[in-house]
Amino acid sequence: MNFEISPQVEDYRARIADFASREILPLEEDRSSYDAHENIALPVLETLRAKAKAAGLWCLQLKPETGGAGIGRMGMAVCYEEMNRSIFGPVVFNSSAPDDGNMMVLEALGTPEQKEKWLKPIVEGKVRSAFAMTEPHPGGGSDPGMIMTRAEKRGDKYVVTGRKWFITGAGEASHFILIARTSDDPRHGLSALLFHKDQPGWRIRRRIDIMGPEEHGGHCELEFDGLEIPADELLLGEGRGLKVTQTRLGPARLTHCMRWLGLAKRCVEIARAYAAERQGFGVRLADRESIQVKLGDLAMRIEIGRLLVMKAAWELDRGGFARKEVSMAKIHVANLLHDAADVGIQINGARGYSKDTVLEWIYRYARQARLVDGADEVHKMVLNRFLNDEGADFWRWNVAANA
């Protein structure tokens, strides 16, 4: 693959970097910028979103006809990394989970009518959205085949009963994509349905307290007790729910990695700045070999993560599924983010453990990275399955067609 980026993508990257430095980063030091759950306060966010739109930096990931810039997955890798130099960054540009993944799956699979009704308001920033799949035991988590929430066809409607939990953003969402069981067929038993928060027959049982910080709308437990969804709100058709989840979750896992790389780089940035000025026993921390080894190791691992992410993005852009590549990136970058925050805190000492920097925020946030969108162990099992199926071809090179 060619590791050069286009002038268009570089222009977006530079403009995002400038916007983040001028408009977003200063807000991190002001406690009034935060809501009760340690995310950016919604009134502050709305002001920044208006500025991002005016600057032409809004929804870059989507196609031009949808309201985006059509930069592709490789362009997203560059831009998302830059956005998440700030802990508040991605949501300002309408490129944060879960809206990001929901917009892309609706763009890819929705009918024209569904795009107008369900996608357009999210793109415009008028509503937020959620993807309701994960269930409490004994329901489905990493294994969607275990999903127990049912959508029973009655005339021209589906009636939904069941429970979901850890549904990110549900507390602030208006538009929902629900994965439910419409039959017991092992491959075609799941369907994806669209519903609005104001439809009766469901409720949020609780917002689940987590280590935090939290996304807007938290991580909620939902209960369905007779929610009626018209049949024309099926996404892709009955029995195609597994296809919907695959279309959504693969790229969404990768966009997490893109953003996490930005946070990992921020940890190194804070650590380097402090090490350059802090002295002990007559020596700057930056001049100590132990500190140099820590930072050099992180620099290498961040670059490895960028290469894994970019290879997966390249594979997606050329029409592949990139299942192996996404799993490898997800494992590596999730662990890298945790370690980058840990090293940053260690170098900063008590300052890093305090709220004087965002390191402790990133550290708490980072622990979820090894769980969301598939735990490390699940992705390693996936890689082993590919290894068993492909043998030595697991590491094959892609061969270009003859000129």
Image: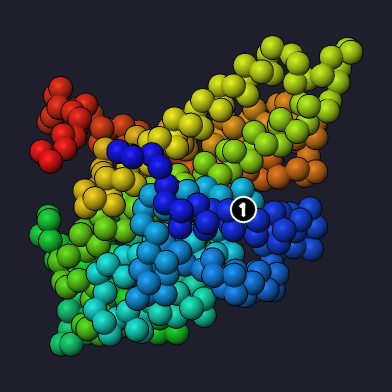
Image height of 275 relative to 183, above or below: above
Residue at the front extreme of this rendering = 403
Residue 46, given in percent of the width and then of the height, sits at: 64, 74
Q: Would residue 341 be seen by someone viewing this image from the given angle?
A: yes
Q: Residue at point 28% right, 50% down?
A: 316
At which x and y percent is residue 168? Answer: 48, 60
Q: Position of residue 326 (x, y in %)?
A: 33, 42
Q: In this view, which residue lies farthest toward the bottom?
A: 156
| 364 displayed left or right of 136 | right
Q: Residue at x 52, y 58 (%)?
A: 12
Q: Residue at x 37, y 79 (%)?
A: 118
Amino acid at pointer 1: Ala
Look at the image and tell me in which quarter the N terminus lies: top left
Most foreground residue, 77 or 192: 77
Q: Quadrant of residue 270?
A: top right
Q: Quadrant of residue 71?
A: bottom left
Nearer to us in this view, 335 or 153: 335
Disc 1 target residue: 17
